[in-house]
Amino acid sequence: MSTSKFHITTGAVWHGVWNAGKIEPNRRLYDFELVWFSSGKARVIVGNEVYECLPGSVIIIPPEAVHCTVADSAVERWCIHFDWYGDCRCHDDPQEKESYFVYDTPANDRFVPTLAAAIPDLPGVTFPHFCRSVPGEVYKYIRDFFSLHGRDVLGANGSFLLALSGALNSHPHSSQAVSVLLKAKSCIDRKFSSSTLTASAVAESCGITVNYLNRLFKETFGVTTTGFIISRRLEYAETLLADSGLSIKMAAEMCGFNDHNYFIRLFKAKKGITPGTLRREKA
């Protein structure tokens, strides 16, 4: 582990959209790059691994690793270069300041490893660090960084440190965790209309704790397990009210709500319209 103190320094930044089908030439970095995908679908290939990136995905690519990005659809990316100890020569050397990365091609084979930033020893963190979905506040901090970059150094640095911390603490799901998540989602998709279905029941069917299940749902879908169940019920209720002559009470019961007054309040809060008004508008 390096004995140097952390002195995180940001370098080049880029924000833009790639058209579907764009394939980036292989390249290697002199520093780290944090990439947030705000829309579209892409693959980032680093070494022998392929990372499927969707809206909300973040990947932190380390120095020296050969990598490229493939845009499977039109994709919007926000990219921030940085190092940990202020030791990446490219950030300060006037002759090298534009060389944050080098395309790994025979015509441009000039990567110099001694110019690369050091990799920190962070317990529990390996690079590339990939999260299919990070908390919403991370997106906010990244946008704040871009709005402040170049005009408010302290504000921009503070926003970046918060974004970096949030990304590093959003641990990627293992294949086992993804399997559990899909099993839980399938259970809800099949049984949401049962009033006895709860987050605890879903967790029990998957052999995990409800706290762990809630964390998986929050990180992946942005809502708790209960919130996901309610969302499914309300979507079904909207379909029933629009396409059938059911009473509101009956529709509520068929969607898993035993108390139709609670259903009406919840529907209005989530949809911005009462069930009765929706039914009249769709009639």
Image: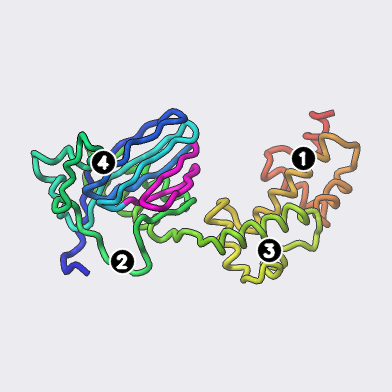
Residues at discs 4 and 1 in contact (Cβ within 8 Å): no
Marks 3/4: CA distance?
49 Å
Quadrant placement of the C terminus: top right
Amino acid bearing label 1: Glu
Q: Which of marks 3 and 4 is nearer the N terminus?
A: 4
Q: Name the residue under label 4.
A: 104
Mark sitting earlier along the chain (2/4)? 4
* Residue 53 x, y percent position in the rendering: 47, 45
Q: Where the N terminus falls, by quadrant? A: bottom left
Q: What element carries label 1?
A: helix
Q: Do the residues under discs 3 and 1 have CB atoms within 8 angstroms?
A: no
The residue mark sitting in front, 2 or 3, is 2
Q: Name the residue under label 1.
A: 238
Residue bearing the label numbered 3: 199
For marks 2 and 3, the one nearer the N-term is 2
Taken as a whole, is the magenta stretch helix, strand or loop? strand
Mark before the other along the chain sequence, 2 or 1:
2
| Label 4: few (<14), some (14–19) or many (≥20) C-alpha neighbours in 10 Å | some
> Which residue reaches farthest left?
94
Q: Mark 2 points at which residue?
A: 122
Query: 250 left or right of 126?
Result: right
Q: Which amino acid type is marked by label 4? A: Asp
Q: Which of marks 2 and 4 is in front?
A: 4
- Which residue: 70% across, 55% down? 186
Residue found at x 19% / y 67%: 2
Q: Could you tell me which secondary element the residue under label 2 belongs to?
A: loop
Which amino acid does the dot numbered 2 rest on? Leu
